Image (spheres, helix red, strand yellow):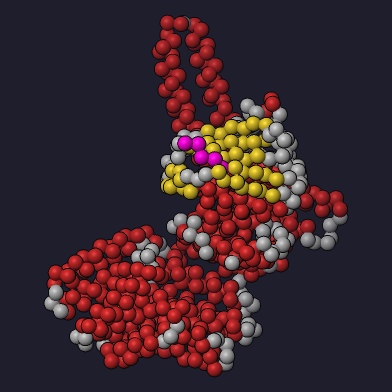
């Protein structure tokens, strides 16, 4: 449905485009695609003016980017985006965005097993939404009942059962109140009541109030809400335990079978419900003195819970408040950096390059001079040279790491300069010459940030990075890449066309192979005139796949074809719309392809332009 709606959105409709990428990112299970949607959503807000014009859409883009880092267990980077969101949201002016922010923090506390803190953040979300009088009820009913239920759930996890019981009852009362005001339908009421009755019944059972628990749980399963039948899986598990308590084993067995069926049908990837099912079955058999069957299910439960505890161990160790404070201090320090410090960094950056070149030149000169003096010592000098080059290579890696750190630290100050220059451009007390100078600062800064981004993603071509390969459906990856970049092509009235003559799975790093095709297609867009077609063709060739990216652009001169894959090559030209070239994208792509035992080359397109070929083993 989202992809159908995308066709109706105009390319200059920033708000609706950002919401499309936000929801498309939330609904994908592909981490590489998630990265693409998040980056595309954020790219819509590269200018401060756009961020100010569409603040809610911008916050959603930041939330999606934070979700990328959480999916890769990089919580520190996610917290940086939460800090930006916190500076943008106001609980009185935009309560829904503030509630979204607080629930994200609550989710992290929940993953850390800090249940009281998680419950407190969910209650804060509910209170902010509850005090809001300027939003239509239909917009926040779901958010409010979800916050109440989540707060109760985490109090239950913290064994604060009275508070959990109170919140579940409050949730049921809230639903009835909203139904009386005609803010929710009967179907919505039934779906939500199942969840609250399920949780309330579970708490009553934990408190030993089994008669009341049985009544609530049987009321939940009796509700006719077929579309939410899957949510009754936990209800049947709790019913089985209550029936077992009353020694009503036939009904307990029926409830367990129903829970097993629902979990198998709807929750094949859920690693929380399966241990609960095994625990319930073990208790069912132990209650009947069937120790052999009970022990088998208990063993499965212990193995599954051990795996879950190990998986969340690192996250549980993280001090969220300390991380938040560290991120805040780091951002404040960067904002306080002065322009002179930026210049000093540029000088150091240049000096390191010069220092790296001097020992190479001196060593080469020394070895050449010594080899002429005595040919009989050639072998000995050769060994000495080899040792020296190894040491030099190690030093070169150290220098490159230092440069990478400095490039990373340069990015934020330069971005700050661009933001300040943009803000000054919005002022009206500058003459035309001054505005032209400010615009030059903005353009130069944006180009510098883009080049630094490419340097950081290249790894500076010195580290022997270990590739983490997995099975990749190359046709699906190319289709996703084509879909994302068609939006960029639309800016030049171009179209990216994908044709598949076969398919195969390759062993590769999804992220790096994605980067290669992203570079190649973006280059084709950059160096092709308006109204042209970029064609991507996939072919299966026995034990390999070949991908061709053909454009109708300005082509590559014969003298530059040998240099085009060199790092910082001089064989570069501006794009057809004046786009800035950096001369490192193809070098990065060649390195990635060769690390995958593949090859990349180019030919002239008979119809004008260039065809890049990539061949990868299956």
User: Residue 535: x percent and y percent?
Assistant: 65, 44
User: Residue 404: x percent and y percent?
Assistant: 54, 42
Residue situated in front as seen by the camera: 162 or 545: 545
* Vertical placement of residue 95 versus 347, above or below: below
User: Residue 539: x percent and y percent?
Assistant: 54, 40
Q: Quadrant of the C terminus?
A: top left
Quarter holding residue 194: bottom left
Quarter holding residue 94: bottom right
Residue extent of the magenta highlight: 538-542
48 left or right, relative to 98: right
Q: Tell me what residue is drawn at x 13 percent, y 77 percent.
A: 289
Q: Quadrant of the N terminus?
A: bottom right
* Vertical placement of residue 323 versus 383, above or below: below
429 magenta-colored: no
* Vertical placement of residue 342 versus 424, above or below: above
* Vertical placement of residue 244 versus 177, above or below: above
Residue 558 in sight: yes
37 left or right, relative to 385: right
Q: Tell me what residue is drawn at x 47 percent, y 76 percent.
A: 121
User: Residue 588: x percent and y percent?
Assistant: 56, 38
556 left or right, relative to 408: right
């Amino acid at each position: 449905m989202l992809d159908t709606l995308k066709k109706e959105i105009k390319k200059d409709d920033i708000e609706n485009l950002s919401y499309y990428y936000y929801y498309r990112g939330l609904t994908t299970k592909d981490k590489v695609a998630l990265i693409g949607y998040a980056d595309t959503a954020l790219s819509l807000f590269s200018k401060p003016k756009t961020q100010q014009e569409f603040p809610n859409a911008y916050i959603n883009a930041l939330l999606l980017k934070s979700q990328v880092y959480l999916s890769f267990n990089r919580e520190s980077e996610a917290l940086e985006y939460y800090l930006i969101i916190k500076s943008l949201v106001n609980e009185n002016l935009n309560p829904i965005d503030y509630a979204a922010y607080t629930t994200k923090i609550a989710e992290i506390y929940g993953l850390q097993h800090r249940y009281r803190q998680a419950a407190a953040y969910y209650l804060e979300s509910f209170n902010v939404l509850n005090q809001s009088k300027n939003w239509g009820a239909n917009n926040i009913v779901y958010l409010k009942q979800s916050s109440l239920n989540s707060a109760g759930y985490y109090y239950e996890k913290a064994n604060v059962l009275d508070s959990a019981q109170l919140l579940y009852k409050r949730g049921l009362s809230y639903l009835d109140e909203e139904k009386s005001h005609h803010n929710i339908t009967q179907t919505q009421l039934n779906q939500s009541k199942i969840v609250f009755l399920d949780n309330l019944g579970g708490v009553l059972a934990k408190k030993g109030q089994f008669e009341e628990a049985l009544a609530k749980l049987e009321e939940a399963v009796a509700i006719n809400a077929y579309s939410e039948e899957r949510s009754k899986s936990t209800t049947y598990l709790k019913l089985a335990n209550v029936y077992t308590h009353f020694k009503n084993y036939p009904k307990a067995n029926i409830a367990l079978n129903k829970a097993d069926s629902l979990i198998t049908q709807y929750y094949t990837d859920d690693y929380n419900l399966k241990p609960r099912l095994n625990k319930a079955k073990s208790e069912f058999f132990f209650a009947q003195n069937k120790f052999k069957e009970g022990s088998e299910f208990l063993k499965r439960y212990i193995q599954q819970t051990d795996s879950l505890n190990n998986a969340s161990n690192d996250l549980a160790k993280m001090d969220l408040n300390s991380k938040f404070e560290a991120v805040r201090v780091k951002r404040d320090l960067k904002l306080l950096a002065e322009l002179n410090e930026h210049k000093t960094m540029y000088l150091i950056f240049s000096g390191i390059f010069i220092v790296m070149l001097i020992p190479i030149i001196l060593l080469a000169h020394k070895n050449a001079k010594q080899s002429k003096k005595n040919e009989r010592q050639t072998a000995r000098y050769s060994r000495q040279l080899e040792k020296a080059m190894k040491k030099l290579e190690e030093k070169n890696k150290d220098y490159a790491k230092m440069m990478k750190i400095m490039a990373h630290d340069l990015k934020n100050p330069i971005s700050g300069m661009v933001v300040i220059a943009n803000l000054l451009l919005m002022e009206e007390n500058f003459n035309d010459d001054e505005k032209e100078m400010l615009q030059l600062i903005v353009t130069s800064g944006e180009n510098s940030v883009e080049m630094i981004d490419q340097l950081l993603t290249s790894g500076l071509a010195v580290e022997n990075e270990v590739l983490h390969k997995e099975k990749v459906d190359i046709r699906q990856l190319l289709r996703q890449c084509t879909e994302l970049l068609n939006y960029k092509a639309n800016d030049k009235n171009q179209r990216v066309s994908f044709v598949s003559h076969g398919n195969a799975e390759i062993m590769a790093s999804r992220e790096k192979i994605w980067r290669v095709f992203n570079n190649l297609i973006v280059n084709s867009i950059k160096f092709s005139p308006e109204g042209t077609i970029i064609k991507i063709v996939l072919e299966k060739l026995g034990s390999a796949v070949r991908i061709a990216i053909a454009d109708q652009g300005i082509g590559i001169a014969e003298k530059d074809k040998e240099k085009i894959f060199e790092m910082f090559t001089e064989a570069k030209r501006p794009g057809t719309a004046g786009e800035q070239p950096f001369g490192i994208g193809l070098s990065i792509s060649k390195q990635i392809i060769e690390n995958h035992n593949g090859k990349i080359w180019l030919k002239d397109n008979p119809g004008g332009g260039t065809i890049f070929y990539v061949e990868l083993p299956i």
